[in-house]
Amino acid sequence: MPQSMAAFALLTPVVIFFGLSVIYPLFETIRISFWQIRGLGKPTFIGIANYQRLFTDPTFLGTLWTTLIFTIGVTVISVAIGWFLAMLCSFAPKQTSIFRLMIFATFGISEAVAGYIWIGIFRPGESGLLNGVLIALGLGDWSQAWLGSAHSALMALIVAASWSSVGLPLLLSFAAVQTIPRTVLEAAQMDGAKPLAVVWYIMMPLSTAGARVAIFINLLSALRAFDIIFVLTNGGPARATETVGFFMYRESMTQFNLGYGAAATIVLLVAVLVVAIPAIAQRTKGAH
Amino acid sequence: MIRLGRVLGALGIAVTMACQPASAQPTGEISLMNWLGGADAAVIKQVIAGFEAKYPDLTIKQVPVTTSGDQRGGIRTALLGGQKVDLIINAWPAFRKELADAGMLRDVSSVWTEKNWDSLLSPTWRELSTTDGAVYGVPYIFGYRSGIWHEPQDLTRIGLTAFPADWNGFTATFEPLRKAGFAEPVALPGKIYGHSEWFESLLLRVGGPEVINELASHKIKWTDERLVKALQFYSEMMAKGCCADIQTIYASHWDDAADRLFVDRSANYLLIGMWINARARSQYHLEPGKDYALGKFPAFGLGHDDDSLVDSKEVLATNLGANAEGADLFLDYLINGEGAGIIAKAGFTVPTSAVDISAYDPVAASSVGYVKAGKVHFVLGDMLPGQLVDEYRVALQKFIANPVEAQIMPTLEQIEAVAAQSY
């Protein structure tokens, strides 16, 4: 069998599967976004009216802002902490293996489960873990209903989502640091570089590849976040923590405005592509 | 000898014919779309087991629907995807109408008459099960939603021997309860929908089931004076110090609020559905009637003091499945003594009179008594279209953050604006 035929034969199942599971639903979502569908009622073709409504809907415009804050917050915090921990762990790789494993395990916990864990931490009153600790430390004045105001609820969400996103940057940055030749590090030490200088001038610059991949993945995850928001705040109070992903769910699944929800989905898809395409292009260019 | 043989033969034929049913029992598989979880799912499983034991030629295949949050999205998706079922479990009257309008339900009015369900379900329940003149199924569980959960010993501490019967008496307890050391007389869960429970019961007392029915079908506007009055009472309750700060209210779901009443002992009253009864018994290990009780929503003297709000679960018959006769038999089983007995034994209150009130614990029995005392209506939230119910709850959330007279009309106008586009 010629090589091209073999390649074709091997690719065909994947292309069919990808077409059925990704391409077809994508085109179907785009098609639905031009229709008004309410519940089980008869659909009506309305052209771009869903998109026009979307960009004049104050609730949706609010979700764009919330999504931006949430996405940047989660990405910056999770990557910064993950990268920093990776540097620390690099000084004693063997001794910190269990520590790394424990942190990376949070990456494997579903967002919904993470949400329930953090509900226990942020519960109002003394029964909430965070409030309980504050009271025990004599900082009772700081205790509050963390999920009860627009500002603190969003911050709480960012903290909770960052917690479950630290593992990946840690792992990728740690792996990148491990690829730095020992000779480079030894030369720096022989030249009298202190640990902080080694981290700042050698380890961090040479491990940016891992951090970049982590930024890319965490950015996309945060953009599409839903589960943890659903469990922790349900988009509240009074929609203050609704992101585009949550808005999409509410419109599509709770209110069953499928067309309107589909339009929001396409807007989210465009946002994801705006982030993903340059990143993929850069990675592809690097590979060449 | 020949004559004796003929007689015995004829006798044998007669006996055989007498033993045969008048009409053949349906056989085969009945499909039931079931989205329930927890205790609700467990009781349906028991009912199905009982049904299959009684009718060995029939089996029930459960078609599960699992989605997060509002299950209607999952049910719609399954049905639009071509799922064929004989029966659907439903909890939302508004959704029943949506299914009926989509032509998916089967009118069982003739079955209702034929099987004499009127002898088991009151005219009120038939009315509540009716959509545009047709009956599409039977209710099998209901929960009283105008009851205030409390611990009687809290009231004893402030010198009361019984739950306050009227609104003024009720609101007058806030201050002494706070002085007695309770942080929040009313645990108000405002995270998702718990805050709307108060509004709906206030509206019931002000305007009765009629105003809720008219509002649900948008025959009256949300700016109606009875709604204004209900929000004024809500404002009054908050002004008299009913509740915790708004952050705590916003951060509380019904389970947190229940914990503050039954575990932390920092709250005194909670207005929420009958599922608290199961939680209080199994999770808090409290004894119903002794450790906790259910008070009837206070009277206003406006002519609706005995009326009740309820939620219910019903099984709807569809015209999608292949076993309509079997489905009807299951509906009949649900409201007759055997099926309903299994449900009542599991701690749920049932609308059918086939179960005696003595089957219930004291709290469940009191709820049945309250419901029997007056007119009954579904909670407003279950009657509203999806888009509107969401906007209504969010508007109320915003209102309770600043519950002043000046905010009443803007709040109602905001809901009305969405209502105008939702029907």
Image: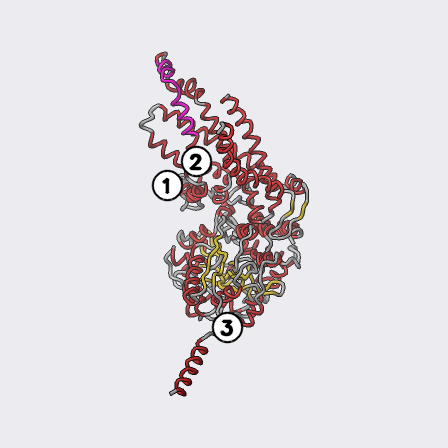
Decide if residue B156 is on the left or right side of residue B396.
Answer: left
Instruction: Give the labeled residue for mark 3.
Output: B23
| Amino acid type, residue under disc 1 in the picture | Ala
**Is A100 contained in the magenta span?**
no
Residue drawn at 43 percent across, 22 percent down: A207
* Vertical comparison of A41 with A21: above or below: below
**Labels 1 and 2 within one chain:** yes
Q: Which secondary structure, mark 2? A: helix
Where is residue A119? Give x, y as percent.
44, 44
Where is residue B229? Give x, y as percent.
61, 58
Decide if residue B85 is on the left or right side of residue B292.
Answer: right
Mark 1: few/some/many CA within 10 Å (<14, 14-19, 20+): few
* Residue range highlighted in magenta: A169-189
Instruction: Give the labeled residue for mark 2.
Output: A163
Where is residue B228? Give x, y as percent.
63, 56
Label annotation for residue B265: none
* Vertical comparison of B305 with A228: above or below: below
The alpha-carbon separation of the residues under discs 1 and 2 comes to 23 Å
Instruction: Give the labeled residue for mark 1.
Output: A136
| Amino acid type, residue under disc 3 in the picture | Ser
Q: Chain of mark 2?
A: A
Nearest to the observer: residue A45 or residue A134: A45
Q: Chain of mark 1?
A: A
Q: Chain of mark 3?
A: B
Q: Which secondary structure, mark 3? A: loop
Q: Residue B209's image quarter?
A: bottom right
* Vertical comparison of B249 with B101: above or below: above
